[in-house]
Amino acid sequence: MKTGRVAYAGAIHAACPHERGVRLADGRVLTEADVVWLPPFEVGTLIALGLNYSDHVKELSKELTITTKDEPLVFLKGPGAVIGHRGFTRRPADVTFMHYECELAVVVGQPAHKVRAADAMRHVAGYTVCNDYAIRDYLENWYRPNLRVKNRDGGTVLGPWLVDAEDIENPHDLTLRTLVNGNVTQQGHTGNMINDIPALIEYLSAFMTLQPGDVILTGTPEGVVNVNVGDEVVTEIEGIGSLVNTIVGDDAFGR
């Protein structure tokens, strides 16, 4: 089952896909452009993984001081970073390299504390698509993500749908790809994660309690390229959906 959340006519509505766009819980059918898309669920803590695909580690090898044998590179994001499908993400005028990151987002469904990997998947409610932007100009300390790089307002796009975990037979056997203005620029496979979902839940829940609505962003494969104002970026994951986002300049935000 796929579910989402949209704003329409001054209210927030639960929604599901429809052949003509989106169907609200009250039965009304609207086009995608008729509604404002919100993240498809109430988002808790965003727990993001850096460098969790072996090919992406190779892609950035000249910049790195970590190896695939190190502990997962984890950082947190605040709620202000999150926007929904068809949203607009700002590219500051002073940057030279801003890139997307197509990621499988794992949504926690029940509390997890000191969970073993063998039991981890029962704590997963479902999955959605994430496009997690980074501004490489602002990196500090050898690709250790910092606030200006990874916690920017509107820089983490989620949606359009939350797909129930039971509807995804194997989350480690999904293709990912990114298109910029209709051209494929990134392709990958979730089977190439360095730390898979059970391992991540075991690792994280060993020192923090994961709560319903928390999101684990599992990293991106190689193929990140610079995006510019006016670009339409579509991040897709097999069986999960296609997430659309547009890059805008400072003027759109009045600064």
Image (tube, rainbow, N blue to C red):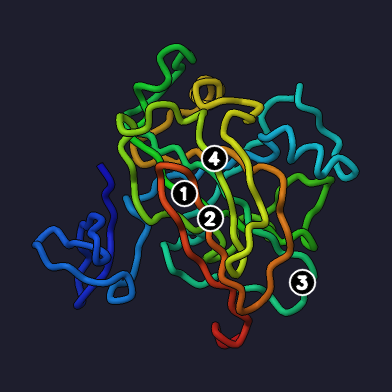
- Residue 13 at x, y percent in the picture: 20, 62
Q: Residues within 10 Å of mark 3 (few under 14, many from 20)?
A: few
Q: From mark 1 to mark 4, how far is it between C-alphas? A: 12 Å
Q: Seen from this angle, which residue lies furthest left?
A: 26
- Residue 229 at x, y percent in the picture: 65, 78
- Assess whether mark 2 and mark 1 are in contact (beta carbons under 8 angstroms): yes
Depicted 210 relative to depicted 229: above or below: above
Which mark is nearer the camera, 4 or 2? 4
Q: From mark 1 to mark 2, how far is it between C-alphas? A: 7 Å
| Label 2 residue SS | strand
Residue underneath mark 3: 95
Which mark is nearer the camera, 1 or 4? 4
Give the mark nearer the N terminus: 1 vs 2.
1
Q: Seen from this angle, which residue lies furthest right?
A: 62
Residue underneath mark 4: 175
Give the mark nearer the N terminus: 1 vs 4.
1
Question: What residue type is disc 2 on?
Answer: Thr
Which mark is nearer the camera, 3 or 4? 4
Question: What residue type is disc 4 on?
Answer: Thr
Residue underneath mark 1: 129
Residue underneath mark 2: 235
